[in-house]
C-alpha cells in the first residue's frame, strides 16, 4: 500500500463522515459511523465500511446508503481535490459486533472460573 493511497483513504474517511453527519438529510442514515475506507490501487473503487448504532435498522440504513452514494460522491467532487472520485460501495463492518461477541465469551469464561 502506498502512502498516496493511505492519504486518500484517510481524506475520504474524514469527508464521507462529515457528509453523512451534516449533508445527507435521509432519516434512515442516522447514527452511521464510518470505520474504514479501502481504495483500489487504480483509485476507481472505494469500499466504505460503516457501522450502525441501531442493529434493527441495519438493512434500511444500508439500502439508504446505497441510494445516497451518488449524492455523497457528488459532494466529494466538490470537497476533495482529485481528478476522479472513486465509486463508493458501502459495506457493513462486522468487526465491532465480532469484538463484542469475543468480549462476552471471555467474560463468560471468567465468571465460570470464579
Image: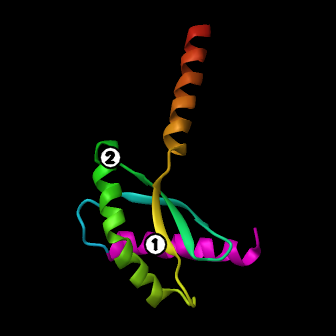
The answer to which of 114 and 22 lies nearer the viewer is 22
Residue that badge 2 annotates: 54
Residue 61 shows up from this direction: yes
Cα separation between marks 2 and 1: 20 Å
Mark on residue 74? none
Secondary structure at badge 2 equals loop
In the depicted structure, whether residue 79 falls above or below residue 41: below
The answer to which of 30 and 39 lies nearer the viewer is 39
Q: Is residue 61 left or right of residue 47?
A: left
Q: Residue at x 60, y 71 (%)?
A: 10
Q: In which quadrant of the rendered image does the C terminus lie?
A: top right
Q: Residue at x 57, y 9 (%)?
A: 112
The residues colored magenta run 1-23
Q: Is residue 45 left or right of residue 92?
A: right
* Residue 38 drawn at (x, y percent): 60, 64
Who comes first in sequence, dot 2 or dot 1? 1
In the depicted structure, whether residue 74 falls above or below residue 57: below
Q: Residue at x 33, y 70 (%)?
A: 68
Residue that badge 1 annotates: 16
Secondary structure at badge 1 equals helix
Mark 2 surroundings within 10 Å by alpha-carbon count, few (fewer than 14), some (14 through 19), many (20 or more): few
Residue 114 shows up from this direction: no
Amino acid at each position: 500500500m502506498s502512502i498516496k493511497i493511505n492519504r486518500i483513504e484517510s481524506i475520504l474517511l474524514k469527508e464521507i463522515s462529515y457528509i453523512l453527519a451534516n449533508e445527507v438529510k435521509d432519516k434512515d442514515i442516522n447514527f452511521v459511523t464510518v470505520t474504514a475506507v479501502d481504495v483500489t490501487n487504480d483509485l476507481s473503487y472505494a469500499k466504505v465500511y460503516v457501522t450502525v448504532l441501531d442493529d434493527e435498522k441495519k438493512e434500511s440504513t444500508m439500502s439508504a446508503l446505497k441510494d445516497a452514494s451518488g449524492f455523497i460522491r457528488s459532494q466529494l467532487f466538490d470537497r476533495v481535490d482529485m481528478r476522479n472520485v472513486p465509486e463508493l460501495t458501502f459495506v457493513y463492518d462486522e468487526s465491532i459486533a465480532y469484538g463484542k461477541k469475543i468480549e462476552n465469551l471471555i467474560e463468560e469464561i471468567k465468571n465460570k472460573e470464579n
